[in-house]
Image (cartoon, grey):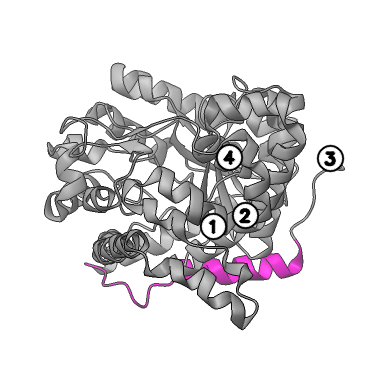
Amino acid sequence: MSERWIECSPEARHRQEERFALWSATEDIPFISEEKKALFIERSGLLKDAIQLKNIPARIPVCPSVGHFPFEYANISWRDALYDYEKLNYAWKKFHDDFELDASGGPANIPWGPALDVLGMLGYKWPGGTLGDDSEYQFVDQEYMLAEEYHDLIDDPTGYFLNVYFPRMFSSLKGLSRIGCLPAVNEIAKIPSVFSGFGTTEVKEAFDKINETGDILSEWMTNFRAIGLSLKARGIPSFTGGYTKAPFDVVGDCLRGTRGIFLDMFRHPDLLLETCDRLVPFMIKDGINSCNASRHLLLFMPLHKGADAFMSEEQYRTFYWPSLRKVIIGLVDYGIVPLLFAEGSYDRKMEVIKDVPEGSVVWWFENSDMEMAKQTVGQVACICGNVPLDLLCTSTPDEVRKYCRKLIDTAGRDGGFILSTAAGIQGSKPENIKAMLDFAREYGVY
Protein backbone atom coordinates (compact mmCIF):
# COMPACT_ATOMS: atom_id res chain seq x y z
CA MET A 1 0.00 0.00 0.00
CA SER A 2 1.32 3.44 -0.92
CA GLU A 3 2.62 5.55 1.94
CA ARG A 4 0.28 8.35 0.87
CA TRP A 5 -2.86 6.29 1.40
CA ILE A 6 -4.57 6.98 4.70
CA GLU A 7 -7.21 5.06 6.54
CA CYS A 8 -10.56 6.55 7.42
CA SER A 9 -10.56 7.29 11.17
CA PRO A 10 -12.82 5.14 13.39
CA GLU A 11 -14.87 8.21 14.28
CA ALA A 12 -15.41 9.17 10.63
CA ARG A 13 -16.24 5.57 9.72
CA HIS A 14 -18.81 5.45 12.53
CA ARG A 15 -20.43 8.66 11.29
CA GLN A 16 -20.42 7.29 7.74
CA GLU A 17 -22.22 4.14 8.92
CA GLU A 18 -24.80 6.29 10.70
CA ARG A 19 -25.41 8.26 7.52
CA PHE A 20 -25.65 5.08 5.43
CA ALA A 21 -28.29 3.77 7.85
CA LEU A 22 -30.27 7.01 7.64
CA TRP A 23 -30.03 7.15 3.84
CA SER A 24 -31.14 3.54 3.35
CA ALA A 25 -33.91 3.54 5.98
CA THR A 26 -37.27 2.33 4.64
CA GLU A 27 -39.69 3.28 7.44
CA ASP A 28 -40.97 6.54 5.94
CA ILE A 29 -41.12 5.45 2.29
CA PRO A 30 -44.58 4.61 0.85
CA PHE A 31 -43.41 1.74 -1.41
CA ILE A 32 -45.83 0.85 -4.18
CA SER A 33 -45.16 -2.85 -3.58
CA GLU A 34 -43.09 -5.21 -1.47
CA GLU A 35 -41.07 -5.98 -4.59
CA LYS A 36 -40.05 -2.33 -4.87
CA LYS A 37 -39.10 -2.26 -1.20
CA ALA A 38 -36.87 -5.29 -1.72
CA LEU A 39 -35.27 -3.58 -4.73
CA PHE A 40 -34.62 -0.44 -2.69
CA ILE A 41 -32.87 -2.46 0.03
CA GLU A 42 -30.85 -4.44 -2.55
CA ARG A 43 -29.76 -1.36 -4.48
CA SER A 44 -28.81 0.58 -1.36
CA GLY A 45 -26.64 -2.34 -0.30
CA LEU A 46 -24.94 -2.55 -3.70
CA LEU A 47 -23.98 1.12 -3.54
CA LYS A 48 -22.75 0.88 0.04
CA ASP A 49 -20.57 -2.13 -0.79
CA ALA A 50 -19.11 -0.40 -3.85
CA ILE A 51 -18.35 2.83 -1.98
CA GLN A 52 -16.73 1.04 0.95
CA LEU A 53 -14.69 -1.22 -1.37
CA LYS A 54 -16.28 -4.40 -0.03
CA ASN A 55 -14.84 -7.46 -1.70
CA ILE A 56 -17.04 -8.43 -3.42
CA PRO A 57 -20.61 -7.11 -3.85
CA ALA A 58 -23.23 -9.16 -5.68
CA ARG A 59 -23.01 -7.03 -8.83
CA ILE A 60 -22.00 -3.65 -10.15
CA PRO A 61 -24.57 -0.87 -9.51
CA VAL A 62 -25.66 1.03 -12.62
CA CYS A 63 -26.35 4.73 -12.05
CA PRO A 64 -26.24 6.83 -15.23
CA SER A 65 -26.42 10.59 -15.02
CA VAL A 66 -29.98 11.34 -16.11
CA GLY A 67 -29.15 14.89 -17.12
CA HIS A 68 -32.02 16.43 -19.04
CA PHE A 69 -32.95 13.37 -21.07
CA PRO A 70 -36.36 12.96 -19.35
CA PHE A 71 -37.55 16.16 -21.09
CA GLU A 72 -36.70 14.78 -24.51
CA TYR A 73 -38.09 11.35 -23.71
CA ALA A 74 -41.42 12.79 -22.52
CA ASN A 75 -41.50 15.32 -25.37
CA ILE A 76 -41.73 18.43 -23.20
CA SER A 77 -39.74 21.60 -23.76
CA TRP A 78 -37.02 23.00 -21.55
CA ARG A 79 -39.33 25.90 -20.78
CA ASP A 80 -42.02 23.47 -19.64
CA ALA A 81 -39.55 21.81 -17.29
CA LEU A 82 -38.53 25.15 -15.75
CA TYR A 83 -42.02 26.60 -15.38
CA ASP A 84 -44.58 23.78 -15.10
CA TYR A 85 -44.54 21.39 -12.11
CA GLU A 86 -46.98 18.94 -13.64
CA LYS A 87 -45.06 18.52 -16.88
CA LEU A 88 -41.72 18.22 -15.07
CA ASN A 89 -43.14 15.60 -12.70
CA TYR A 90 -44.65 13.67 -15.59
CA ALA A 91 -41.37 13.62 -17.50
CA TRP A 92 -39.31 12.58 -14.50
CA LYS A 93 -41.62 9.75 -13.47
CA LYS A 94 -42.11 8.49 -17.03
CA PHE A 95 -38.38 8.14 -17.55
CA HIS A 96 -37.82 6.29 -14.28
CA ASP A 97 -40.79 4.01 -14.88
CA ASP A 98 -39.40 2.99 -18.27
CA PHE A 99 -35.69 2.67 -17.39
CA GLU A 100 -34.49 0.66 -14.38
CA LEU A 101 -31.76 2.62 -12.59
CA ASP A 102 -30.07 1.46 -9.41
CA ALA A 103 -30.04 5.01 -8.05
CA SER A 104 -31.24 8.39 -9.21
CA GLY A 105 -33.01 11.38 -7.71
CA GLY A 106 -35.20 14.39 -8.24
CA PRO A 107 -34.41 17.13 -10.78
CA ALA A 108 -31.84 18.88 -8.61
CA ASN A 109 -30.00 20.39 -11.59
CA ILE A 110 -33.13 21.99 -13.04
CA PRO A 111 -33.28 25.68 -12.05
CA TRP A 112 -36.78 26.99 -11.34
CA GLY A 113 -37.66 29.67 -13.87
CA PRO A 114 -39.98 31.87 -11.76
CA ALA A 115 -37.28 32.29 -9.10
CA LEU A 116 -34.71 33.29 -11.72
CA ASP A 117 -37.19 35.82 -13.11
CA VAL A 118 -37.82 37.45 -9.74
CA LEU A 119 -34.12 37.66 -8.87
CA GLY A 120 -33.18 38.98 -12.30
CA MET A 121 -30.40 36.42 -12.65
CA LEU A 122 -27.56 37.82 -14.78
CA GLY A 123 -25.05 34.96 -14.57
CA TYR A 124 -27.21 32.58 -16.59
CA LYS A 125 -29.55 32.58 -19.55
CA TRP A 126 -32.46 30.16 -19.64
CA PRO A 127 -35.49 29.11 -21.69
CA GLY A 128 -38.43 31.26 -20.77
CA GLY A 129 -35.97 34.07 -20.02
CA THR A 130 -33.85 35.16 -22.98
CA LEU A 131 -33.45 31.76 -24.68
CA GLY A 132 -35.78 29.74 -26.87
CA ASP A 133 -38.17 27.24 -25.33
CA ASP A 134 -36.03 24.22 -26.24
CA SER A 135 -32.60 25.64 -25.37
CA GLU A 136 -30.61 24.42 -22.38
CA TYR A 137 -29.73 27.06 -19.82
CA GLN A 138 -26.33 28.69 -20.33
CA PHE A 139 -23.74 30.13 -17.92
CA VAL A 140 -22.45 33.61 -18.71
CA ASP A 141 -18.70 33.38 -18.04
CA GLN A 142 -17.27 36.76 -17.10
CA GLU A 143 -15.60 38.62 -14.23
CA TYR A 144 -18.04 39.21 -11.38
CA MET A 145 -15.19 40.07 -8.99
CA LEU A 146 -12.35 42.41 -9.84
CA ALA A 147 -8.75 41.37 -9.26
CA GLU A 148 -8.26 44.24 -6.81
CA GLU A 149 -11.12 42.91 -4.66
CA TYR A 150 -9.38 39.74 -3.47
CA HIS A 151 -8.65 41.29 -0.07
CA ASP A 152 -12.30 42.33 0.35
CA LEU A 153 -13.38 38.72 -0.20
CA ILE A 154 -10.66 37.32 2.07
CA ASP A 155 -11.47 39.76 4.89
CA ASP A 156 -15.24 39.14 4.86
CA PRO A 157 -16.58 36.47 2.46
CA THR A 158 -20.20 36.77 3.61
CA GLY A 159 -20.16 40.54 3.43
CA TYR A 160 -18.56 40.45 0.00
CA PHE A 161 -21.16 38.07 -1.41
CA LEU A 162 -24.02 40.06 0.12
CA ASN A 163 -22.84 43.59 -0.69
CA VAL A 164 -20.89 43.13 -3.91
CA TYR A 165 -21.45 39.78 -5.64
CA PHE A 166 -25.24 39.55 -5.25
CA PRO A 167 -25.86 43.06 -6.65
CA ARG A 168 -23.72 42.16 -9.68
CA MET A 169 -25.26 38.72 -10.19
CA PHE A 170 -28.95 39.60 -9.60
CA SER A 171 -30.44 42.75 -11.06
CA SER A 172 -33.21 42.75 -8.44
CA LEU A 173 -30.72 42.82 -5.56
CA LYS A 174 -28.68 45.88 -6.43
CA GLY A 175 -29.98 47.54 -3.28
CA LEU A 176 -27.97 45.18 -1.09
CA SER A 177 -24.90 47.26 -1.88
CA ARG A 178 -26.38 49.87 0.51
CA ILE A 179 -26.08 47.59 3.56
CA GLY A 180 -23.33 48.69 5.92
CA CYS A 181 -20.55 46.68 7.55
CA LEU A 182 -22.41 44.43 9.97
CA PRO A 183 -19.43 43.52 12.21
CA ALA A 184 -19.22 47.26 12.95
CA VAL A 185 -22.31 46.95 15.18
CA ASN A 186 -20.25 46.37 18.31
CA GLU A 187 -21.41 49.42 20.31
CA ILE A 188 -24.78 51.09 20.74
CA ALA A 189 -23.48 54.18 18.98
CA LYS A 190 -22.97 52.21 15.76
CA ILE A 191 -26.61 51.14 15.43
CA PRO A 192 -27.86 54.26 13.57
CA SER A 193 -25.10 54.35 10.97
CA VAL A 194 -25.45 50.67 10.06
CA PHE A 195 -29.17 50.01 10.42
CA SER A 196 -30.30 53.19 8.69
CA GLY A 197 -29.34 51.57 5.40
CA PHE A 198 -32.08 48.99 5.88
CA GLY A 199 -34.63 51.79 5.74
CA THR A 200 -33.75 52.85 2.21
CA THR A 201 -36.12 52.09 -0.64
CA GLU A 202 -33.42 50.15 -2.52
CA VAL A 203 -32.71 47.76 0.37
CA LYS A 204 -36.40 47.24 1.13
CA GLU A 205 -37.08 46.39 -2.53
CA ALA A 206 -34.19 43.92 -2.56
CA PHE A 207 -35.51 42.15 0.54
CA ASP A 208 -39.00 42.09 -0.96
CA LYS A 209 -37.54 40.20 -3.93
CA ILE A 210 -35.66 37.86 -1.59
CA ASN A 211 -38.86 37.12 0.32
CA GLU A 212 -40.78 36.51 -2.90
CA THR A 213 -38.05 34.18 -4.14
CA GLY A 214 -38.10 32.34 -0.83
CA ASP A 215 -41.84 31.70 -1.15
CA ILE A 216 -41.43 30.44 -4.71
CA LEU A 217 -38.56 28.13 -3.84
CA SER A 218 -40.24 26.80 -0.71
CA GLU A 219 -43.02 25.51 -2.95
CA TRP A 220 -40.41 24.21 -5.42
CA MET A 221 -38.58 22.29 -2.71
CA THR A 222 -41.82 20.64 -1.62
CA ASN A 223 -42.37 19.46 -5.19
CA PHE A 224 -38.73 18.37 -5.57
CA ARG A 225 -38.88 16.25 -2.41
CA ALA A 226 -42.14 14.71 -3.57
CA ILE A 227 -40.51 13.60 -6.83
CA GLY A 228 -37.58 12.08 -4.92
CA LEU A 229 -39.95 10.25 -2.58
CA SER A 230 -41.92 8.90 -5.53
CA LEU A 231 -38.70 7.42 -6.97
CA LYS A 232 -37.87 5.79 -3.64
CA ALA A 233 -41.39 4.36 -3.59
CA ARG A 234 -40.51 2.74 -6.92
CA GLY A 235 -37.43 1.13 -5.36
CA ILE A 236 -34.83 3.69 -6.54
CA PRO A 237 -32.52 5.15 -3.85
CA SER A 238 -31.35 8.73 -4.26
CA PHE A 239 -27.84 8.91 -5.71
CA THR A 240 -26.81 12.23 -4.20
CA GLY A 241 -28.10 14.43 -1.44
CA GLY A 242 -26.49 17.78 -1.94
CA TYR A 243 -23.88 19.84 -3.71
CA THR A 244 -20.74 21.78 -2.95
CA LYS A 245 -17.66 22.86 -4.91
CA ALA A 246 -13.90 23.01 -4.95
CA PRO A 247 -12.74 26.43 -3.68
CA PHE A 248 -10.74 27.04 -6.87
CA ASP A 249 -13.92 26.54 -8.90
CA VAL A 250 -15.90 28.93 -6.71
CA VAL A 251 -13.38 31.63 -7.62
CA GLY A 252 -13.04 30.59 -11.26
CA ASP A 253 -16.68 29.88 -12.05
CA CYS A 254 -18.53 32.48 -10.04
CA LEU A 255 -16.15 35.32 -9.27
CA ARG A 256 -13.12 35.89 -11.47
CA GLY A 257 -14.31 33.92 -14.51
CA THR A 258 -12.22 31.42 -16.48
CA ARG A 259 -9.93 33.98 -18.07
CA GLY A 260 -9.51 35.92 -14.84
CA ILE A 261 -8.54 33.02 -12.61
CA PHE A 262 -5.99 31.57 -15.02
CA LEU A 263 -4.35 34.98 -15.34
CA ASP A 264 -4.37 35.25 -11.55
CA MET A 265 -2.36 32.03 -11.27
CA PHE A 266 0.51 34.07 -12.72
CA ARG A 267 -0.33 37.62 -11.62
CA HIS A 268 -1.79 37.09 -8.13
CA PRO A 269 -0.85 33.56 -7.06
CA ASP A 270 -0.59 34.29 -3.32
CA LEU A 271 -3.97 36.04 -3.17
CA LEU A 272 -5.59 33.23 -5.13
CA LEU A 273 -4.21 30.60 -2.77
CA GLU A 274 -5.25 32.58 0.29
CA THR A 275 -8.75 33.00 -1.10
CA CYS A 276 -9.11 29.28 -1.82
CA ASP A 277 -8.10 28.49 1.76
CA ARG A 278 -10.52 31.14 3.06
CA LEU A 279 -13.39 29.42 1.25
CA VAL A 280 -12.64 25.91 2.58
CA PRO A 281 -14.81 26.09 5.75
CA PHE A 282 -17.71 27.55 3.79
CA MET A 283 -17.64 24.68 1.29
CA ILE A 284 -17.47 22.13 4.12
CA LYS A 285 -20.38 23.74 5.98
CA ASP A 286 -22.41 23.96 2.77
CA GLY A 287 -21.88 20.26 2.09
CA ILE A 288 -22.75 19.25 5.64
CA ASN A 289 -25.90 21.37 5.63
CA SER A 290 -26.97 19.87 2.28
CA CYS A 291 -26.56 16.29 3.47
CA ASN A 292 -28.18 16.96 6.82
CA ALA A 293 -31.22 18.45 5.10
CA SER A 294 -31.56 15.49 2.70
CA ARG A 295 -30.58 12.81 5.25
CA HIS A 296 -27.98 11.64 2.77
CA LEU A 297 -24.24 11.05 2.66
CA LEU A 298 -23.26 11.22 -1.03
CA LEU A 299 -22.38 14.81 -1.86
CA PHE A 300 -21.97 15.81 -5.51
CA MET A 301 -18.91 17.93 -6.31
CA PRO A 302 -18.40 18.87 -9.98
CA LEU A 303 -14.75 19.72 -10.62
CA HIS A 304 -14.80 22.21 -13.45
CA LYS A 305 -11.33 23.65 -13.90
CA GLY A 306 -8.90 20.99 -12.72
CA ALA A 307 -8.82 18.92 -15.91
CA ASP A 308 -5.65 18.09 -17.82
CA ALA A 309 -6.65 20.52 -20.58
CA PHE A 310 -6.83 23.40 -18.10
CA MET A 311 -3.73 23.00 -15.96
CA SER A 312 -0.56 20.97 -15.55
CA GLU A 313 0.05 18.52 -12.72
CA GLU A 314 2.30 21.07 -11.02
CA GLN A 315 -0.36 23.78 -11.26
CA TYR A 316 -2.98 21.34 -10.01
CA ARG A 317 -0.81 20.41 -7.01
CA THR A 318 -0.25 24.08 -6.24
CA PHE A 319 -3.57 25.80 -6.87
CA TYR A 320 -6.38 23.25 -7.06
CA TRP A 321 -5.71 20.17 -4.95
CA PRO A 322 -4.64 21.56 -1.54
CA SER A 323 -7.89 23.41 -0.79
CA LEU A 324 -10.01 20.73 -2.46
CA ARG A 325 -8.40 18.05 -0.32
CA LYS A 326 -9.10 20.07 2.82
CA VAL A 327 -12.78 20.16 1.83
CA ILE A 328 -12.75 16.40 1.14
CA ILE A 329 -11.18 15.59 4.52
CA GLY A 330 -13.53 17.97 6.32
CA LEU A 331 -16.55 16.27 4.77
CA VAL A 332 -15.23 12.74 5.36
CA ASP A 333 -14.72 13.59 9.03
CA TYR A 334 -18.47 14.20 9.24
CA GLY A 335 -19.26 10.85 7.61
CA ILE A 336 -20.06 12.38 4.23
CA VAL A 337 -18.90 10.68 1.02
CA PRO A 338 -17.82 13.27 -1.58
CA LEU A 339 -18.85 12.24 -5.11
CA LEU A 340 -16.14 13.99 -7.11
CA PHE A 341 -17.02 14.44 -10.78
CA ALA A 342 -13.69 14.85 -12.59
CA GLU A 343 -14.78 16.63 -15.75
CA GLY A 344 -12.59 16.22 -18.80
CA SER A 345 -9.48 14.04 -18.51
CA TYR A 346 -7.65 13.50 -15.21
CA ASP A 347 -5.02 11.08 -16.55
CA ARG A 348 -2.16 13.31 -15.39
CA LYS A 349 -3.69 13.79 -11.94
CA MET A 350 -4.26 10.17 -10.82
CA GLU A 351 -1.22 10.03 -8.53
CA VAL A 352 -2.31 13.27 -6.88
CA ILE A 353 -5.98 12.54 -6.26
CA LYS A 354 -5.50 9.10 -4.73
CA ASP A 355 -4.38 10.84 -1.54
CA VAL A 356 -7.77 10.44 0.18
CA PRO A 357 -9.08 8.33 3.08
CA GLU A 358 -9.68 4.75 1.98
CA GLY A 359 -13.28 3.79 1.18
CA SER A 360 -14.60 7.30 1.84
CA VAL A 361 -14.97 9.03 -1.54
CA VAL A 362 -16.21 8.26 -5.04
CA TRP A 363 -14.25 9.50 -8.05
CA TRP A 364 -16.52 9.84 -11.10
CA PHE A 365 -14.51 10.18 -14.31
CA GLU A 366 -15.68 11.67 -17.60
CA ASN A 367 -12.92 11.16 -20.20
CA SER A 368 -10.15 9.59 -18.13
CA ASP A 369 -8.48 6.25 -18.78
CA MET A 370 -10.51 3.90 -16.57
CA GLU A 371 -7.86 1.19 -16.53
CA MET A 372 -5.37 3.74 -15.18
CA ALA A 373 -7.98 4.97 -12.71
CA LYS A 374 -8.51 1.42 -11.45
CA GLN A 375 -4.80 0.86 -10.93
CA THR A 376 -4.30 4.11 -9.01
CA VAL A 377 -7.29 5.85 -7.48
CA GLY A 378 -9.34 2.64 -7.59
CA GLN A 379 -7.04 1.00 -5.06
CA VAL A 380 -8.22 3.39 -2.35
CA ALA A 381 -11.55 4.80 -3.59
CA CYS A 382 -14.64 3.70 -5.46
CA ILE A 383 -14.51 4.84 -9.09
CA CYS A 384 -17.46 5.66 -11.31
CA GLY A 385 -18.00 6.22 -15.03
CA ASN A 386 -17.77 6.54 -17.95
CA VAL A 387 -19.90 5.45 -20.92
CA PRO A 388 -19.36 8.30 -23.43
CA LEU A 389 -22.25 10.51 -24.43
CA ASP A 390 -21.27 10.43 -28.11
CA LEU A 391 -21.52 6.64 -28.02
CA LEU A 392 -25.03 6.79 -26.55
CA CYS A 393 -26.10 9.47 -29.04
CA THR A 394 -24.70 8.10 -32.30
CA SER A 395 -23.82 4.40 -31.99
CA THR A 396 -25.75 1.15 -31.88
CA PRO A 397 -26.81 -1.01 -28.90
CA ASP A 398 -24.14 -3.57 -29.83
CA GLU A 399 -21.41 -0.92 -29.69
CA VAL A 400 -22.74 0.26 -26.33
CA ARG A 401 -22.67 -3.28 -24.97
CA LYS A 402 -19.11 -3.72 -26.26
CA TYR A 403 -17.95 -0.60 -24.45
CA CYS A 404 -19.71 -1.61 -21.23
CA ARG A 405 -18.08 -5.05 -21.37
CA LYS A 406 -14.62 -3.47 -21.60
CA LEU A 407 -15.46 -1.03 -18.81
CA ILE A 408 -16.67 -3.78 -16.49
CA ASP A 409 -13.66 -6.01 -17.28
CA THR A 410 -11.20 -3.26 -16.42
CA ALA A 411 -12.70 -0.76 -13.96
CA GLY A 412 -15.13 -3.23 -12.44
CA ARG A 413 -12.66 -5.88 -11.33
CA ASP A 414 -12.99 -6.88 -7.66
CA GLY A 415 -15.68 -4.33 -6.80
CA GLY A 416 -15.32 -0.67 -5.95
CA PHE A 417 -17.00 0.42 -9.17
CA ILE A 418 -20.27 2.13 -10.17
CA LEU A 419 -21.09 2.02 -13.86
CA SER A 420 -22.31 5.40 -15.04
CA THR A 421 -22.14 7.74 -17.97
CA ALA A 422 -19.49 10.31 -18.78
CA ALA A 423 -22.07 13.09 -18.60
CA GLY A 424 -25.82 13.69 -18.64
CA ILE A 425 -27.53 11.53 -21.24
CA GLN A 426 -29.52 14.19 -23.10
CA GLY A 427 -29.51 13.49 -26.83
CA SER A 428 -29.04 9.74 -26.33
CA LYS A 429 -30.96 7.07 -28.19
CA PRO A 430 -33.42 5.34 -25.83
CA GLU A 431 -32.41 1.92 -27.18
CA ASN A 432 -28.77 2.66 -26.30
CA ILE A 433 -29.65 3.65 -22.74
CA LYS A 434 -31.62 0.45 -22.36
CA ALA A 435 -28.73 -1.60 -23.79
CA MET A 436 -26.33 -0.03 -21.27
CA LEU A 437 -28.63 -0.70 -18.30
CA ASP A 438 -29.62 -4.24 -19.26
CA PHE A 439 -26.14 -5.40 -20.25
CA ALA A 440 -24.45 -3.95 -17.16
CA ARG A 441 -26.93 -5.66 -14.84
CA GLU A 442 -26.52 -9.00 -16.60
CA TYR A 443 -22.76 -8.97 -17.21
CA GLY A 444 -21.65 -7.03 -14.13
CA VAL A 445 -22.33 -9.92 -11.75
CA TYR A 446 -19.48 -11.14 -9.54
Kindly indicate whether the residue at mark 2 contacts the one at mark 1 (C-beta within 8 angstroms): yes
Other residues around mark 2 within 10 Å, as few (<14) / some (14–19) / many (≥20): many
The reply, left or right, for residue 72 in relation to residue 58 is left
Residue bearing the label numbered 1:
48
Position of residue 410 measured from the top left corner of the image (x, y, whole percent): 58, 29
Which numbered disc, 2 or 3, marks the residue that appears first in the sequence?
3
Foreground tag (2 vs 4): 4
- 243 relative to 233 in the view: left or right: right
Badge 1 density bin: few <14, some 14–19, many ≥20, Cα 10 Å: some
Q: What residue is pinned by disc 2? A: 52
Q: Amino acid at mark 2?
A: Gln
Indicate which disc residue 428 carries.
none
Look at the image and say whether residue 402 sits in the magenta stretch: no
Q: Quadrant of the N terminus?
A: top right
Please give the residue where the numbered disc 3 appears in the rendered image: 2
The residue to which callout 4 is attached is: 251
Tell whether position 29 is magenta.
yes
Q: Nearer the viewer, residue 203 or 375?
A: 203
Which of the marked residues, 4 or 3, is nearer the chain's N terminus?
A: 3
Could one spot residue 58 in this view of the protein? Answer: no
Q: Nearer the viewer, mark 1 or mark 4?
A: 4
The CA span between labels 2 and 3 is 18 Å
- Circle 3 sits in a helix, a strand or a loop, which is it? loop
Q: Is residue 104 left or right of residue 99?
A: right
User: What amino acid is found at the position of numbered circle 1 in the picture?
Assistant: Lys
SS category of the residue bearing label 4: helix
Residue at the image position 53 percent from the left and 51 percent from the top: 244
- The stretch of residues the image draws in magenta is 9-32
Q: Are marks 2 and 4 in contact (CB under 8 Å)?
A: no
